[in-house]
Image: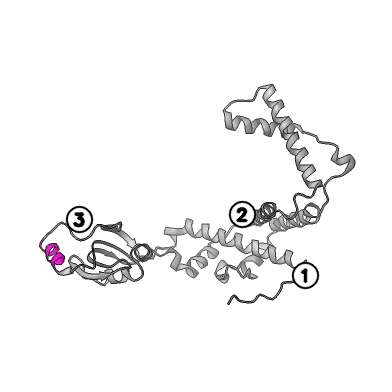
């Protein structure tokens, strides 16, 4: 049975398991050969010179593409004059492109370097799209990353912000049926929170607030509960326990994440293979003091 992404929990390692399976796929051999040819003759080739550089041919296929692009924007086919103008603009772009290459303007350009990197990574991502996971691959991935598919514990509650005020009179008013919105201090914090997980609650009120709220007895006003902003009175309304779905319930999500992992593994494997062509010399990196 083929290896699964379960064996690749370190995304940055580019290990031999899933990437090895991917690299053994026949279709990927073709894609990798294409990558090698692209590297050998594309990135390292010189710009066209002399007679070749003097010819700019606009093919019928390019005219059709220009026409299709015009129609996609304007919802109609271009007139002959408009199509002629598009072709002339294409020639203008090609002239500038070739002259820029001749002047070396593509060298040491951060934007161009990043764009070329993106294209190389796109080749790897395209190859990963050709890989079809089997059922065991997906189930293994689901088991290995169960925490990603588990819905965390969630809480619904109301809060009244006290700041530094004495909580006793406010708590007495709330216990007597007082309207929470008319008590305490105004703030930008939400008075009512619905079905929120710890990350959302702590992101709003500060670390540890979710744990303090969920430790309260549901249905009664309690406090003070400390947040990053001050003291609160809190009524816990509903506490929903964490829920782990079955594999069938999240199969589509599992496959989506598996494919993303496959693309990352293949991208890393291709990078490591290309890196072997170079002797990399790095200066010693001293930590900042």
How many marks do you count on the picture?
A: 3
x 66%, y 22%: residue: 79
Q: Residues within 10 Å of mark 1 (few under 14, many from 20)?
A: few
Q: Secondary structure at mark 1?
A: loop
Image disc number at residue 152: none
Q: Is residue 7 left or right of residue 241?
A: right
In the picture, which quadrant includes the C terminus? bottom right
x 64%, y 65%: residue: 19
Does 149 appear in magenta?
A: no
Residue 167 against residue 194 in the figure, above or below: below
Residue 279 against residue 193 in the figure, above or below: below
Residue 77 against residue 172 in the figure, above or below: above
What residue did someone put label 2 on?
Answer: 129
In front: mark 3 or mark 2?
A: 3
**Front one among 285 and 46:** 285
Q: Residues within 10 Å of mark 3 (few under 14, many from 20)?
A: some
Q: Position of residue 49 (x, y in %)?
A: 87, 44
x 11%, y 60%: residue: 177
Q: Secondary structure at mark 3?
A: helix
Q: Secondary structure at mark 2?
A: loop
Q: Which residues are magenta?
A: 169-176
Image disc number at residue 279: 1
Does 170 appear in magenta?
A: yes
Image disc number at residue 181: 3
Q: Position of residue 27 (x, y in %)?
A: 69, 55
* Marked residue nearer the N-terminal end (1 or 2): 2
Q: Looking at this rendering, what residue extends furthest in the right direction?
A: 51
Q: CA distance from mark 3 to mark 2?
A: 53 Å
């Amino acid at each position: 049975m083929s290896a699964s992404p379960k064996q690749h929990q370190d995304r940055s390692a580019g290990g031999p398991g899933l990437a090895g399976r991917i690299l053994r796929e026949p279709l990927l051999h073709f894609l990798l050969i294409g990558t090698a040819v692209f590297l050998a003759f594309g990135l390292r080739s010189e710009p066209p010179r002399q007679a070749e550089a003097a010819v700019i041919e606009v093919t019928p296929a390019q005219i059709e593409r220009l026409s299709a692009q015009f129609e996609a924007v304007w919802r109609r086919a271009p007139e002959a004059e408009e199509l002629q103008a598009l072709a002339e603009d294409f020639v203008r772009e090609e002239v500038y492109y070739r002259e820029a290459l001749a002047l070396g303007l593509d060298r040491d350009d951060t934007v161009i370097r990043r764009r070329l990197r993106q294209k190389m990574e796109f080749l790897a991502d395209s190859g990963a799209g050709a890989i079809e996971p089997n059922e065991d691959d997906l189930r293994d991935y689901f088991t290995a990353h169960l925490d990603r598919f588990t819905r965390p514990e969630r809480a619904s509650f109301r809060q009244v912000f006290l700041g530094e005020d004495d909580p006793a009179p406010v708590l007495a008013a709330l216990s007597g049926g007082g309207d929470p919105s008319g008590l305490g201090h105004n703030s930008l914090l939400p008075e009512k929170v619905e079905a929120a997980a710890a990350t959302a609650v702590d992101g709003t009120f500060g670390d540890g607030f979710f744990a303090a709220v969920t430790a309260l007895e549901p249905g009664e006003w309690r406090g003070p509960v400390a947040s990053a902003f001050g003291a609160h009175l809190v009524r816990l309304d509903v506490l929903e326990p964490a829920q782990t779905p079955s594999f069938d319930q999240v199969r589509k999500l599992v496959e989506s994440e598996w494919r993303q992992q496959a693309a990352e593994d293949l991208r890393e494997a291709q990078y490591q293979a290309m890196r072997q062509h170079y002797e990399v010399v790095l200066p010693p990196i001293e930590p900042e003091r």
